[in-house]
Amino acid sequence: MKILGIETSCDETGCSIVEDGKQILANVLFSQVCFHEKFGGVVPEIASRKHLEVINTLIDDVFEKAKIKFNEIDAIAVTQGPGLVGALLIGITTAKCFAWVLKKPLIGINHLEAHLFSIFLEQEIFFPFIGLIVSGGHTLLVYVKDFDTYEILATTVDDAAGEAYDKVAKLLELGYPGGHIVEKFAKIGNSDFVVFPQSKFKNKKLAFSFSGLKTAVSTYILKCKEKKISFKKEDVCASFQKSIINSLVKNTIESAYKYEVKNIVLSGGVACNKALQLEMTKAASLEKIKVFYPSNHLCTDNGAMIASLAYYKFKKNNSFLDFLDMNAFPDWELGD
Ligand code: KG4
Ligand code: ZN
């Protein structure tokens, strides 16, 4: 079964054709980063306009690369939420047009669920597993029993992990989006240079919080500037990264231990981070737990994960449940 996947939830236009949930026949992506970076974040209006400009060309491109004709696909999958409403609507309207013209089934996919299962594009993972989704807008710890059976164990009470990386990059004037730049700087910095706080919750509640950490970094930088104390950005990045990774690793290992799960799966843009992959793997190996993560281009937003999850949903339900009156769900929570 060949499925066309369309992703337009934020600032990347992604189109992909995936066969049987696994084989990527073609995967194309248009990143809008250069249009947003001067604003230090994604501008929703610009995002929608750029999706609109490129989506048709991208779809032509993906069919050409996959070497198949439009009517050879079996279904169309599209990100229905969460995300920016205008951006989502570009993808949804395009998908609807294709479904209507080609008389093919249409399926709306939750972007976070697609991240969670993106690993299946590259590896077969045994259920149950603990999934850690770490992206620009979300930080979620999920106990996954099957493709449609999972439980949210923890989320962030304030900023998402990727958001914290981006904010620290902004404070240090390193550019946008900042995750990979902070990682690069952290690699050559001293992670013990500043001891930044790690969130603690009452009654051992499992949750994430990164706004305190962000404020601590901001206060540190301000104080240094006020007192004319010089510091190396590399050291601040390394110290910040140590704190955020400790928190992600601690909560993930704790829940794997509690649920007696032997597999951990990382996903979302922050899962590209080599230090996170390494520290998680090190801590997990002490408990004889294995850690998996997709290749970088499948950690960040892409159309392949949308097409792949649609296939697994079809396999479970033996049908596609969505219709041409489908609308965007900008606030669609995982599990709703
Ligand atoms: O999953 P994603 O591509 O988009 C969302 O759904 O949000 O994640 C983007 C986020 C950004 O905040 C970006 O700074 C972060 O992932 N990111 C990283 C790295 N690469 C991307 N954060 C830390 N280290 C990285 N190497
Ligand atoms: Zn994403």
Image: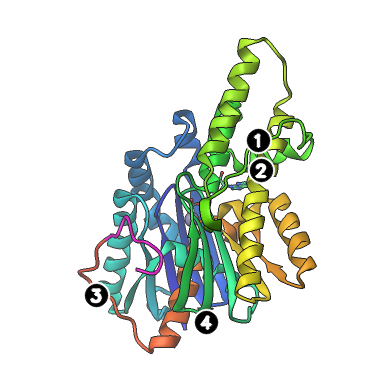
Residue at the image point whose x is 53% and y is 31% from the top:
215
Circle 4 residues within 10 Å: few <14, some 14–19, many ≥20: some
Residue assigned mark 1? 196
Residue assigned mark 2? 243
Cα separation between marks 3 and 2: 45 Å
Residue at the image point whose x is 71% and y is 36% from the top:
239
237 in relation to 94, above or below? above
Residue 123 belongs to magenta span: no
Q: Is residue 173 left or right of residue 30?
A: right
Picture quarter with the C terminus: bottom left
Examine the rendering and report whether any part of residue 75 can be seen.
yes
Residue assigned mark 4? 20
Whichever of callouts 2 and 4 sits on the residue coming sooner in the sequence is 4
Cα separation between marks 2 and 4: 40 Å
Colour logic: rainbow
Comparing marks 3 and 1, which lies closer to the viewer?
1
Residue farthest along the left direction in this orientation: 325
Element assignment for label 1 = loop
Where are the magenta residues, as a range?
328-336
Q: Is residue 189 left or right of residue 175?
A: right
Q: Nearer the viewer, residue 335 or 312?
A: 335
Cα separation between marks 1 and 4: 46 Å
Residue assigned mark 3? 323
Comparing marks 1 and 4, which lies closer to the viewer?
1
Name the residue type under label 1: Phe
Name the residue type under label 3: Phe
Element assignment for label 3 = loop
